[in-house]
Image (spheres, helix red, strand yellow):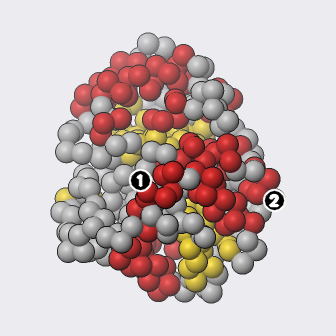
């Protein structure tokens, strides 16, 4: 993995910019209430919030104008008043903006950048520019959940982005939900379920590695401006999660075979897997992971931990790219061993 620069931490009174790199829902009239709610919750933490110039022009405009979305990314990085950047929401369209972004905007202006889902493509661009970014909250989800910003998510937002001490042990949340949020319904309540904690899929002992990952779309980056090589996975703890349609047992097989074929699987120190974003259980996924990793004796002891609270389920903690982390199979624990910000 590359060595990554950590950004400066947040302070009370800092300005955070909101952008729409993947989808423009935040600016649609029937969703704007939720954007405003998310802004209010960030203001309650002592932050100023500013919308990037094109970010609230709505889904139709932004889907037709990837250049405008790219301009917002560069504006947010280059604006010296902006100390952090957060994506409004994910989607499936962020790859279109990558060719329009001048990497020097990121390289010359390192700062906090955060989001999840399709925002991953921008995280990979940040990684290639040498910046540690954060796979975590989008504004609409979970910050602007109609029933409240979950305390677990809010705790990790404050800890990781405002505090420059070691992040430490990431305990599982006491409850979680796989139910989809409703961006248009102000009274929508998602049902939360008791959380069983983490499950050891395989492996022995403990390992340390640098955090790298996102969702299974990593394997679709070949022949793009942000394509990856096996070396990018060297000594990494891979974090991975996805939507149900891309995270079926057969999809896991394809993803792991891709890692094996391109030489990345053998370079990993371990893997952490986010909770399934759906009601299906993990048994079939686990079988396939065990089967593929058992082909090679060198992989049989690689730690793999399932059921962590990040990505498309709620609540979530935040993963800084490049930060040193630890998986302990015996304790079924996961820790981030350093700070995420300076």
Q: Nearer the viewer, mark 1 or mark 2?
A: 2
Query: Is 78 on the left-hand or right-hand side of 155?
Result: right
Can residue 213 be seen in this snapshot? yes
Query: Is 35 on the left-hand or right-hand side of 148?
Result: right
Query: Is 291 on the left-hand or right-hand side of 208?
Result: left
In this view, 66 is above or below 52: above
Q: Mark 1 — residue?
A: 310
- Residue 17: give x, y in percent of width and height: 59, 72
Quadrant position of the C terminus in the picture: bottom right
- Residue 319: give x, y in percent of width and height: 53, 54
Sequence-wise first label, 1 or 2: 2
- Residue 148: give x, y in percent of width and height: 31, 75
Which mark is drawn over residue 160? none
Q: Residues within 10 Å of mark 1 (few under 14, many from 20)?
A: many
Q: Mark 2 — residue?
A: 108
Residue drawn 53% across the image and 47% down it: 94
Q: For this rendering, which residue is in front, 223 or 129?
A: 223
């Amino acid at each position: 993995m590359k060595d990554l620069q950590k950004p400066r931490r947040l302070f009370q009174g800092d300005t955070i910019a909101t952008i729409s790199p993947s989808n423009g829902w935040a600016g649609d009239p029937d969703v704007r209430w939720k954007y405003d709610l998310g802004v209010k919750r960030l203001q309650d933490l002592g932050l100023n919030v500013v919308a990037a110039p094109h970010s609230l022009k709505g889904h139709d405009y932004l889907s037709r104008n990837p250049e405008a979305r790219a301009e917002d990314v560069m504006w947010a990085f280059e604006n010296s008043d902006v100390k952090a950047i957060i994506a409004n929401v994910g989607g499936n369209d962020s790859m279109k903006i990558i060719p329009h972004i001048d990497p020097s905007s990121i390289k010359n202006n390192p700062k906090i950048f955060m989001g999840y889902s399709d925002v991953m493509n921008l995280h990979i661009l940040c990684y290639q520019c040498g910046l540690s970014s954060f796979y975590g909250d989008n504004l609409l989800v979970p910050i602007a959940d109609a029933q409240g910003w979950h305390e677990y998510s809010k705790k990790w937002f404050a800890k990781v982005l405002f505090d420059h001490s070691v992040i430490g042990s990431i305990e599982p949340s006491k409850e979680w939900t796989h139910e989809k949020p409703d961006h248009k319904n102000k009274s929508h309540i998602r049902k939360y379920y008791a959380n069983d904690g983490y499950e050891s899929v395989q492996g022995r002992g403990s390992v340390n590695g640098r955090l790298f990952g996102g969702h299974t779309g990593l394997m679709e980056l070949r022949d793009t401006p942000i394509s990856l090589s096996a070396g990018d996975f060297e000594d990494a703890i891979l974090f991975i999660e996805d939507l149900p349609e891309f995270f079926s047992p057969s999809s896991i097989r394809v993803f792991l075979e891709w890692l094996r074929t391109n030489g990345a699987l053998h370079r990993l120190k371990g893997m952490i897997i986010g909770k399934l974003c759906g009601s299906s259980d993990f048994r079939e996924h686990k079988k396939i992971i065990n089967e593929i990793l058992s082909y090679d004796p060198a992989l049989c002891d690689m730690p793999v931990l399932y059921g962590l609270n990040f990505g498309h389920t709620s609540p979530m903690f935040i993963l800084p790219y490049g930060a040193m982390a630890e998986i302990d199979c015996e304790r079924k624990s996961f820790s981030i061993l350093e700070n995420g910000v300076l």
